[in-house]
């Protein structure tokens, strides 16, 4: 499997800082190309959200550039090791950011949605309400579950998706890295589809657009080249801004080939 990737991030129309952070990596290895992407959304209502998202991104990138690549080179990579490493990073960052907040009398936190693509498999770690989607000839599939109050209420049958769109608690997270005493990340594993587009985004990207609009501009047929992928990201970002989205907006794409 081979990959191409691009991204776009925007401060949006109202905020003074962009508290979203992201990273993309594509490397050649003894087992073929490997892709890694991560999006973190610093809490908009909490102080120092940009610091929280940046710190978590750097921790994951350090892991990818050092520990993970050593595992690939010496053949010691396993799913169990991956889960353990990712959980360790999240727990350590949760404690570090929590201590920093306590020492400075503030709260800070971030979501995390990361995907690793090795051989024909993908692996996802997820905390909060950023998302990972798969767009293929089979349609659009959301690979992560929002860890939010309204998502839980919908799952329990106490709220409809329509009600959730206007509920004043729609942005309330059940957990995030840095502002939660206990963080239990979700882990997802699956088979990569050739010719599919894997999309990572902060919640500001998806509020004002539909799945159909995403497929039209950044789905497999629209992403014939890296330039077309970048155009689609920018187009949808501007569309979201024109629809008066007030949050930061971040989207990253990885296409399999």
Image (cartoon, rainbow, N blue to C red):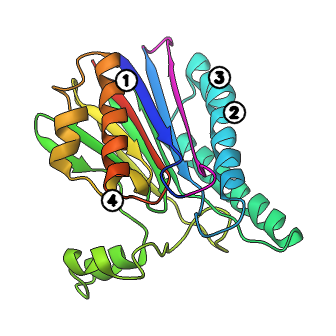
Q: Nearer the viewer, mark 4 or mark 3?
A: 4
| Residue at (57, 65) in percent of width and height | 176
Give how far apart the Cα atoms at labels 4 and 2 are. 31 Å
Q: Is residue 46 left or right of residue 212?
A: right
Give how far apart the Cα atoms at labels 4 and 1 are. 33 Å
Circle 4 SS class: loop
| Residue at (71, 66) in percent of width and height | 47
Q: Are marks 2 and 3 in contact (CB under 8 Å)?
A: no
Give how far apart the Cα atoms at labels 4 and 3 are. 39 Å
Local packing at callout 1 (Cα closer than 10 Å; few below 14, some 14-19, many 20+) is some
Q: Which residue is mark 1?
A: 119
| Residue at (38, 64) in percent of width and height | 146
In front of the other: 128 or 34:
128
Q: Which residue is mark 2?
A: 62
Q: Are marks 2 and 1 in contact (CB under 8 Å)?
A: no
In front of the other: 79 or 167:
167
Q: Which residue is mark 4?
A: 207
Circle 1 SS class: loop
Number of numbered markers: 4
The answer to whether any part of residue 257 appears in the image is: yes
Q: Quarter holding the N terminus?
A: top left
> What residue range appears in magenta?
15-32
Q: Earlier in the sequence, mark 4 or mark 3?
A: 3
**What percent of the width, then of the height, locates residue 70?**
65, 22
Local packing at callout 4 (Cα closer than 10 Å; few below 14, some 14-19, many 20+) is some
Q: Please tell me whether residue 256 is drawn above or below residue 244 in the rendered image.
A: above
Q: Is residue 25 magenta?
A: yes
Circle 2 SS class: helix
Q: Nearer the viewer, mark 4 or mark 1?
A: 4
Q: Which residue is mark 3?
A: 70
């Amino acid at each position: 499997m081979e990959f191409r990737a691009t991204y776009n991030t925007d401060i949006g129309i109202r905020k003074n800082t962009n508290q979203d952070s992201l990273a993309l990596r594509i490397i050649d290895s003894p087992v073929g190309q490997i892709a890694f992407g991560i999006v973190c959304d610093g809490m908009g209502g909490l102080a120092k959200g940009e610091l929280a998202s940046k710190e978590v991104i750097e921790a994951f990138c350090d892991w990818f550039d050092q520990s993970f690549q050593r595992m690939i080179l010496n053949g010691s990579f396993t799913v169990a090791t991956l889960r353990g490493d990712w959980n360790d990073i999240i727990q350590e960052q949760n404690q570090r950011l929590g201590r920093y907040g306590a020492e400075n009398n503030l709260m800070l936190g971030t979501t995390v949605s990361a995907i690793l693509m090795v051989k024909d498999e993908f692996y996802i770690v997820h905390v909060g309400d950023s998302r990972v989607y798969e767009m293929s000839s089979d349609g659009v599939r959301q690979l992560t579950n929002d860890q939010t109050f309204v998502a839980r209420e919908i799952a329990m049958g106490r709220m409809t998706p329509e009600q959730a769109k206007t509920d004043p608690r729609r942005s309330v997270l059940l957990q995030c890295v840095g502002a939660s005493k206990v963080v239990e990340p979700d882990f997802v594993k699956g088979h990569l589809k050739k010719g599919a587009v894997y999309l990572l985004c902060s919640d500001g990207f998806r509020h004002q657009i539909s799945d159909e609009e995403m497929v039209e501009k950044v789905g497999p047929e629209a992403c014939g080249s890296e330039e077309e992928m970048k155009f689609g990201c920018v187009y949808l970002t501007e569309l979201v801004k024109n629809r008066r989205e007030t949050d930061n907006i971040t989207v990253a794409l990885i296409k399999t080939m």
